[in-house]
Amino acid sequence: MSRPWLTPPVPELVDYVAPVAVSKHADAYQSLFARSGICMATVDMGLRVLDANEQFRRDLGAGGDAPVGRELLDFVHQGAHGHLHHQFVRLVEGRSDRVVERVLGVHADDGLLPAQLTAVAVREQVVVTAIVVMLQWEAFPGGAAGRSSRRKVLTPLNARILEGVASGMSTVNLAIKLHLSRQGVEYHVGTMLKKLKVSNRAALVSRAYTMGVLTAGAWPPRVDPEFVR
């Protein structure tokens, strides 16, 4: 799917300048991180993959040149697309220096896995000519239990509490609704804060939407069933 919101006003910037910038800058990045376990790719202004290192090809492209020519967001859970769209627009327009987000990457073998996505702009003078993207896999606590279980990050009770927090419910109201004590609610909220590596409820909700755990566009908030054990 084409994303015109990242296409520059001069078409040649995608078709000509970006590949030049990639050959000039990306090899150094890829050499630096070749053995780090970080997936790296360079993308154009439409977020199409221009080049990718061996780790990216193996983890996200099932080998060969499969990732090249595809859109970067194809490799990220769709629940994060809207938020990443906004962040990449800010990067291209020069309103931010980089994008750093935790997302769920679509791993070739393991399905959805948590990862940190970092993107930096490659500039010639003040013009953004390409974007270098790094995707580093993470693991939730207990992630060694097996590939198929890694996406099942919440218990049914935690999912209901997360939905309540996202809708603005207080601890007292959640406790009444779910027949728990206030301490019980706080315990489960604390567990999710640690699991998603955030420090407060607002960040918990934001991270859950970014990673696709909470379904984008749904109200009242709803946890995607694929993340519930």
Image (spheres, grey):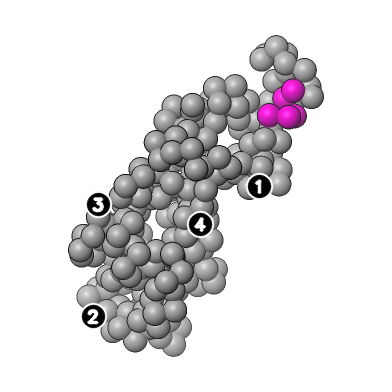
Q: Residue at x 63, y 47 (%)?
A: 197
State which tag comes first along the sequence, 4 or 1.
Answer: 4
Q: Quadrant of residue 56?
A: bottom left
* Amino acid at pointer 4: Gln
* Amino acid at pointer 1: Val
Tell me the residue that label 1 is attached to: 198
Residue 19 locus on image (x, y percent): 27, 79
Tell me the residue that label 4 is attached to: 116
Q: Which residues are magenta?
A: 184-188
* Amino acid at pointer 3: Met
On whether residue 42 falls in the magenta region, the answer is: no
State which tag comes first along the sequence, 3 or 2.
Answer: 3
**Gap in angstroms between the C-alphas marked 4 and 1:** 13 Å
**Gap in angstroms between the C-alphas marked 1 and 2:** 41 Å
Along the line of sight, which residue is nearer the eye, 191 or 97?
191
Q: Badges 3 and 2: C-beta atoms under 8 Å apart?
A: no
Between circles 4 and 3, the one closer to the viewer is 4
Secondary structure of residue under mark 4: strand
Q: Which mark is residue 1?
A: 3
Q: 10 Å neighbourhood of mark 4: few (<14), some, or many (≥20)?
A: some
Q: Badges 4 and 3: C-beta atoms under 8 Å apart?
A: no
